[in-house]
Image: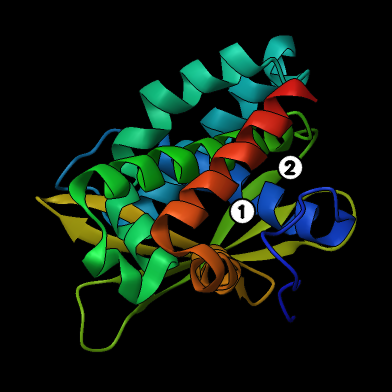
Amino acid sequence: MAPPTGGLPDERNPVLKQLISTATLTLGLLALAPAQATTSADALVRQISSEVIDTAKADKAIQAGEVNRVLALVESKVMPHVNFEVMTRSAVGVQWRSATPEQRTRLMAEFKTLLVRVYSGALAQIKDQTVEVTKTLPVQGSSQLVVQTEVRGKGEPIKLDYRLDKMAEAWKIIDVNVGGLWLVQNYRSQFAQELTKGGIDGLIATLTERNKGASKS
């Protein structure tokens, strides 16, 4: 599936919205778990998926997409288990090396806000889904693992892959794949267009405007 062209991805696009919403939802499902050194990547997935789905189903505020409720959930439960520096660095690409510490901080903050915004819509879509782990594969030449799962409910199951790496004895999520589309890779192709036009500051400005616009809608 080719990523959309012409600037940053528009989450109003129904196909892309479904892909990103599902990816960010299930990224959260994986992340809502204790960071235990003895927990394997696939056990982590099995342990918390049903618990998180049940919690979201029972919370009408989350299902309604209440921003403050979702933001608090993401900040306290999801972010500690996602390596956002790795995700942002990968999405920005080679220009990350020339970014100042301040620019890197702003990029990570805006990228985080972008995904949290989509995540709020994803949580509101939880109905009768369950998550099943189907396979765990090592990434050759690295400490990373790809955990393959399926989100099952009405209709065809949605196949998902999660790339995790073990850092300081805890598994961290660094990318999510939905239907053959890696989330970070998709944003990398979009960010590249903005970087070509306006460099790091141009990308920060574009992300900031996109996030401000979304907060008003």
Left or right of residue 112, residue 129 in this image:
right
In the rendered view, tell whether residue 124 sits above or below residue 58.
below
Q: Earlier in the sequence, mark 1 or mark 2?
A: 1
Residue 21, placed above or below residue 135: above
Residue at image point 55% right, 38% down = 208
Question: For numbered disc 1, what is the local secondary structure?
Answer: helix
* Three-letter residue code for mark 1: Ala
Residue 111 in percent (x, y) is at 48, 46
Badge 2 marks a residue whose secondary structure is: loop
Q: Looking at the rendered structure, which numbered label has been put on residue 23?
A: 1
Split into 4 quadrants, where in the image is the N terminus? bottom right
> Residue shown at 75%/34% (left/top)?
126
Q: Mark 1: give few (<14), some (14-19) or many (20+) Cα within 10 Å.
A: many
- For the C terminus, which image quadrant? top right
Q: Residue at (36%, 41%) from the top-left corner?
A: 106
Q: Amino acid at mark 2?
A: Gln
Camera-side residue of 146 and 202: 202
Mark 1 or mark 2: which is in front?
A: 1
Q: Nearer the viewer, residue 142 or 147?
A: 142
Decide if residue 143 is on the left or right side of residue 70.
left
At horizontal 24% and vertical 42% (from top left) the residue drawn is: 102
As drawn, which residue projects farthest toward the bottom? 140
- Image quadrant of residue 182? bottom right
Residue labelled with disc 2: 129
Left or right? Give the position of 97 relative to 71: left
Q: Position of residue 134 (x, y in %)?
A: 54, 68
Instruction: Tell me residue 167's x, y (percent).
Output: 15, 55
Name, please, the residue furthest toward the left: 168
Residue 127 in sight from this viewpoint = yes
Q: Is residue 79 left or right of residue 178?
A: left
Residue 49 sits above or below residue 57 on the image = below
Q: Quadrant of residue 158?
A: bottom right
